Amino acid sequence: MTGKIKRIGLTLGLFSTIISFLFFGRDQGTYQILLLSGLFVSLIFYLTILFGNETTKLKIIWTLVIVLAGAIQWLTEPILIKSSYLIYLNSNDKELATVNNILKDKPGEISILNDDIIDKTNLLSQSEKDSLIKLLQDLNVYMITKTEDGIYYGLWGFLDVRLGITYWTNSEMPNENYRQLKDKWYH
């Protein structure tokens, strides 16, 4: 394998790893594929550079490139994650506003999961329930939960890890665990 191919492969792997965070909030599958494949490709090509016939100077330079890429990833990760959520919000603005308008003034808690709606106060009409189930699918979320604090949209979840966005409706500001995206939107 030529040195040029190794360096291009390593660079593409590093780029894939960094750019993966643009998909963090809006498409977890794409994020995971880009991140893991980028890490794997970077590792393979870095090892071929490190244990290949490259000069010591090139090995040191490419080690510094790896460290620099790690620093860039560390510094840009929060920005790219926020951008990912903002892309999702802007792409689904109409649907999110429709859900928020249906749920925000309803008292109590309401949960929507798959085709099941839990509305203990029975304040939702059948047409609102049908709309909410369709919007759940259109928004590509696994759950929508309305509490006194806000409306939570579950974008991805596995075991005890949950990623989502919240439209904050409470007059009190959320605690420091929430990061503001824009207006009343937090993650």
Image (cartoon, grey):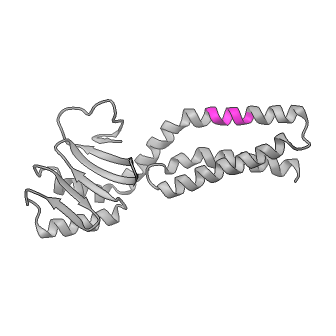
Q: What percent of the width, then of the height, locates residue 175?
A: 28, 31
For the N terminus, the image quarter is bottom right
Residue sitting at x 17%, y 57%: 102
Q: Is residue 177 magenta?
A: no
Q: Nearer the viewer, residue 24 or 32?
A: 32
In the picture shown, does residue 63 fall above or below 111?
above
On the rendered image, what quadrant is the C terminus found in?
Answer: top left
x, y percent for residue 140: 37, 62
Magenta region, residue range: 65-71
Q: Which of the 4 image quadrants contains residue 169?
A: top left
The mark total stands at 0
| Percent of width and height locating residue 163 | 39, 48
> In the displayed structure, does residue 47 sit left or right of residue 146?
right
Tell me: residue 121, above or below residue 178. Answer: below
* Residue in the picture at 64% in, 53% down: 37
Q: Judge by depth and name the residue closer to the eye, 108 or 11.
A: 108
Q: Residue at x 33, y 66 (%)?
A: 137
Membership of 69 in magenta stretch: yes
Q: Is residue 99 left or right of residue 123?
A: right
Q: Nearer the viewer, residue 54 or 118?
A: 118
User: What is the magenta segment's predominant secondary structure?
Assistant: helix
The image quarter containing residue 156 is bottom left
Q: Residue 47: x, y in percent? A: 79, 44
Which is more toward the observer, 176 or 180? 176
In the image, what residue occupies the spot 67% across and 44% down?
14
